[in-house]
Amino acid sequence: MKTRLLSALFVALSLCLVAVGPSPASATSSVVLAYAAWAPNTSYAVGARVTYNGVDYECLQAHTSLTGWEPPNVPALWKRLGTGGGGGGDTTAPSTPTNLRATGTTSSSVSLAWNASTDNVGVTGYQIFRNSVLVDTTTGTTYTSGGLASSTTYSFTVKARDAAGNLSAASNAISATTGTGGGGGGTVTADQLLAKVTSCSQISNGKYKTDSDAGTATVPVCNKTGAVFWKADMDIDCDGVRTTQCNENTDCCFLPDTACHTSGGSPLNAAGLPYVVVPSSSSIWNYTTKGIGCNTVVAVIYNGKIEYAVVGDTGPTQIIGEASYKTASDLGINPDPSNGGTDSGVTYIVFTGSGTKVSTIENHTQAVTLGQQLAQQFINNN
């Protein structure tokens, strides 16, 4: 895990802050008290209650609020209680997702889509089950299950979830079979991409360390036609939406935010979305000079596999080689933020130029589809 002292300090301080706003009325009181209105730049502790647009919410994770983190936008931080005066209790489950279907396969992934569910309050996400085991969650109606074995048949179902935690019945079950060999990535193989990055035309003004305690900086950023690349380690980024895998208990330096946000303005889900961390702009290298930014597609290669991800977060100015929990998991790398990652052997190819960004950062299917096209162009042009 990269050393992020300021991040860790921020989390430690926020966990110690006292909730702002009055406590809920006691069960014996004959007076129903309204909670204080939610406000940005305010410290909230676990259990604090607020009102936003006439709906009451309870804080799930201590934090200091920011504009864009309104309770309906960040279900990882706020649980909906009900309408008006500190009460409520939604017990109605969403409708069952319908028309689950496979929209594409590679040798290591299956892409899925389904028709959206409805709910009396609102659907907040979907749970993905592979071979009857819950493997992930997503907020959209598409999903790509990666890191699969080639020439293998998998079964899938999907359930909808609302803010109160109510689950729908399972969707129709489907089966899909992955393709044969080739290391994933569609028609382009990992070996083909690696053959194009054997030499480095350095564009960074210096080199990066792989970890804060590394003795020397050894990793340059290299230029190619239609991309830049670097070869480094992989440390695990677990920031963003709080999940079972990524939270302040599993990650010493956890932050409930990422540099890039979803199309709805929420932090990214490191446990559910493959994304890459780029070093923050500095005198060593400014990634924006190559048109790189949020939504830019990246091919991450490890042990013969390709994971198409997006740029989703920024890291320390002196360190390189970091990606989300989901990226590591899909590539067969231990994703645990406390002891996971790998010390070497990871190649990051960040595509540059026009048409290299997906329109919806949280839609991994878009990243896979566009990534396969850009990878083929990269092979053709180098």
Image (spheres, grey):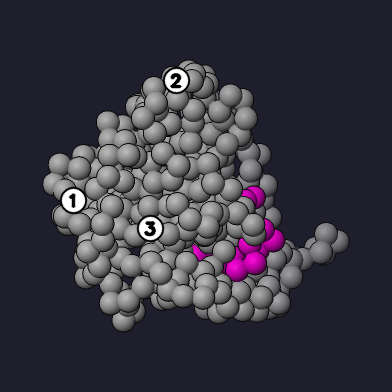
| Label 2 neighbour load within 10 Å: few <14, some 14-19, many 20+ | some
| 1 or 2: mark nearer the eye | 2
Instruction: Point out the tag, 3 or 2, that comes first from the N-terminus.
Output: 2
Asked if 102 appears above or below 292 in the picture, the reply is: above
**Which residue matches tag 3?**
231
Instruction: Answer with left or right where residue 300 lies relative to residue 129.
Output: left
Residue at position x 67%, y 47% in the image: 89
Asked if 148 appears above or below 225 in the picture, the reply is: above
Name the kind of residue labelled 3 in the image. Lys
Residue 57: x and y in percent read 62, 59
Instruction: Tell me the number on the disc at residue 355.
Output: 1
Q: Please tell me whether residue 279 belongs to the stretch shown in magenta.
A: no
| 1 or 3: mark nearer the eye | 3
Q: Please tell me whether residue 254 belongs to the stretch shown in magenta.
A: yes
Instruction: Answer with left or right where residue 177 lies relative to residue 14.
Output: left
Name the kind of residue labelled 1 in the image. Gly
Instruction: Point out the tag, 1 or 3, that comes first from the N-terminus.
Output: 3
Question: Contact, CB < 8 Å: mark 1 with mark 3?
Answer: no
Residue 143: x and y in percent read 43, 36
Q: CA distance from mark 1 to mark 3?
A: 24 Å
Residue at position x 48%, y 55% in the image: 344
Relative depth, front residue between 152 and 113: 152
**Which residue matches tag 2?**
151
Q: Quadrant of residue 182?
A: top left
Instruction: Point out the tag, 1 or 2, that comes first from the N-terminus.
Output: 2
Name the kind of residue labelled 2 in the image. Ser
Instruction: Answer with left or right where residue 80 lies relative to residue 272.
Output: right
Part of the protein shown in magenta: 244-257
